[in-house]
Image (cartoon, grey):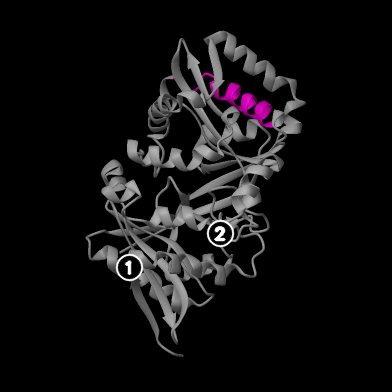
Amino acid sequence: MSEIVVKNLPNSERKKFLKFAFSIYKDYPNWVPPLYIDKLKLLNKNKNPFFKSNDLELFMAFRNGNPVGRIAAIANNTHNRVHNENIGFFGFFECIDDQEVANKLLDTAKDWLQARGFQAMRGPANPTSNDEWGALIEGFDDTPRILMAYNPPYYLKLYENYGLTKAKDLFAYHIQNEEMLKNDKIKRVSDIVKNRYGLKIRPVDMKKFKEELGLFKHAYNKTWAPNWGFIPMTDEEIDAAAADLKPLIDPNLVLFGTIKDEIVGVALVMPDYNQLFKTMKGRLLPFNFIKLLTQKMKIDWCRIIALGIIPEYQKKGLDGAFYYEVLKRAADRGIMRGEASWVLEDNEMMNRGAKTMNGNLYKKYRVYQIEI
């Protein structure tokens, strides 16, 4: 067997790094090629605000001069500061079905992290829990929803043979609007909660997008702060994410809940643009952007990316009112199926909420870890 050589890739070669994925997924019809323009920006140390406080290094493995795998080693200092941990991360892992190659890649990331004083390696993270997070472990027979990960089943074997073990599982629920909207109970409960607390739920006002973004920042960071692995987004990070998502947002699916004009909850629901991206081969130009504009109303899936109530107003049933509002508004747009993801396996409130909507737990993701 010829020697495996792992090389550091400079920032200027990140497109080469990204293109390698096509060789892995050529026989996996459910994979959705990410848009180059998005991933190039994500990995660009001059444009992604993540790199103002954190670092990342790209590596690619070669055998006989041919690429056989890739990985990123990630120093997420923000995570360690927030959670009082000393953990490094790996991400963007792609590899042929070869344990020796996988071991070389993971060793390279581990060595890079160990040299910087980290005591454990966790992942996959692409590059944080606010991005694609975890490895798919159940649900390979379906296309991933927007901003969710997909990988070949054999990656689990590569990870576990290396010595990576479960840190946490993440759940994804399939929800069918038609069934729930026939259920009068969820509407009655929603009406009761709205009347009891004076809850009003409204869509985002795109004419006041900057002001609305400020409200979302406050609610997002406050709502998800207690969650395992959560990293509060800086103003710059949320601004950058909003700029990318703004052209894709359906205003009627981005919701604010208020009581006496105070924000008490938010919901971010996105049409599943992966239905369109799947045919674009990673390219938006020169003509695919036209498809994006003309065919987006044909999308019949959505993803509930975030739905949360700020801590002071939790356990009052407000989330039920949000669930009904999301279901109704999605149905009005012609979207009858959705995914609620991801949900921490031990987040009892969110798992209970997904089951309230008759959600079917149909996919699972795993975050791995190893001591170094």
Give the residue type at disc 1. Pro
Q: Quadrant of residue 248?
A: top right
Q: Nearer the viewer, residue 282 or 92?
A: 282
Give percent across and percent down for residue 313: 46, 19
Q: Which residue is mark 1?
A: 10
- Residue beneath the point at 38% across and 35% down: 226
Q: Nearer the viewer, residue 294 or 135?
A: 294
Q: Nearer the viewer, residue 333 or 166?
A: 333
Give percent across and percent down for residue 282: 56, 59
Give percent across and percent down for residue 279: 65, 57
- The answer to whether any part of residue 4 appears in the image is yes
Instruction: Specify which label sits upstream in the sequence, 1 or 2.
Output: 1
Give percent across and percent down for residue 163: 42, 67
Q: Residue furthest bottom?
A: 1
> Which label belongs to residue 282?
2
| Left or right placement of residue 366 versus residue 4 in this view | right
Instruction: Report the span colored magenta.
Output: 313-330
